[in-house]
Amino acid sequence: MDKLRSATFSRRQTLGLIASVPLIAAGSRAEAKSDITFDELYGKVSVLGLEFSEKVKQLNGKDIAMRGFMAPPLKAEAQFFVLTEIPMSICPFCSTDADWPDDIVVVYLGEKQTFTQPSQTIEVRGKLEMGSWTDPETGFVSLLRIRQAEYATV
C-alpha cells in the first residue's frame, strides 16, 4: 500500500504539473521571439540603399532562427549558402552590396552539412551579423549573415 501511495500524486501536485505545462510551452515560444522573417530585415529602401530594421539592429550578434530556401550553392563543398525568401534555381550572388537584394541572407555553416533541394523549406539557426562584409576566400559581398549556423528541413 505504501508503494502505491508513493506512485500517486496529490491533488496539489497534479494541479502544479498542469499549471507548469503553459510555462514550458511559453519557454519554447520565448525562444521563438528571436525568429526573424525576410519582411523584418529592412526598415526602408531608399536611393541610398537598404536600411536595417530596428529588429535586425537589436538581434545583431544574437542567436536567431530564420526560415527560407537554400539557393543552389556555387560548389558542393562550400561552407556557406544563400538563404532566400522564395525558391530559386540559380544562385543570387551580387557583385557589390549596393546591388544586394532585400530577400537573401548568407549562411555560414558551423560545420559542413549536405545541401538540400532549392524547393525544400529549411530553418536556419545561428548568430545574426549585420553590415557590409567581403568574404576574403570567395570575394562575395554581403550585408547580412548568419554565422556558426546549422539547418534542418521543415
Image (cartoon, grey):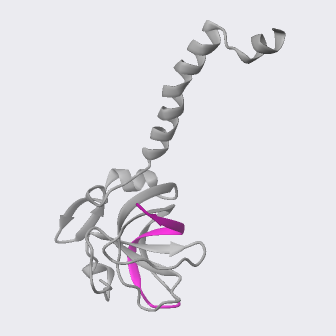
Instruction: Give the residue displayed 35% in from the left and 70% down from the top.
Output: 120
Q: Magenta part mainly helix, strand or loop?
A: strand
Split into 4 quadrants, where in the image is the N terminus? Answer: top right
Write down the quadrant of residue 48 in the picture: bottom left
Write down the quadrant of residue 14 in the picture: top right
Split into 4 quadrants, where in the image is the C terminus? Answer: bottom left
Instruction: Give the residue displayed 44% in from the left and 46% down from the top.
Output: 32
In this rendering, would 140 be left or right of 49? right
Instruction: Give the residue displayed 45% in from the left and 92% down from the top.
Output: 75
In this rendering, would 124 be left or right of 118? right
Q: Where in the figure is residue 126, as x and y percent of width and height?
A: 52, 62
Instruction: Give the residue displayed 33% in from the left and 77% down from the top.
Output: 118
Q: Does the magenta-highlighted stretch encompass residue 78?
A: no
Is 4 in front, or is 30? 4
Is 15 in front, or is 75? 15
State the count of labels.
Answer: 0
60 versus 18 height, above or below = below
Q: Kindly give the residue lying farthest to the right in the view shown.
A: 2
5 versus 110 height, above or below = above
In this rendering, would 73 be left or right of 61? left
Q: Does the magenta-highlighted stretch encompass residue 142?
A: yes
Q: Where in the figure is residue 92, as x and y percent of width and height?
A: 29, 83
Write down the quadrant of residue 94 in the picture: bottom left
62 versus 22 height, above or below = below
Is 69 in front, or is 106? 69
Magenta residues (range): 137-154
Is 143 in front, or is 104? 104
Q: Where in the figure is residue 90, as x and y percent of width and height?
A: 28, 87
Q: Kindly give the residue lying farthest to the front in the view shown.
A: 1
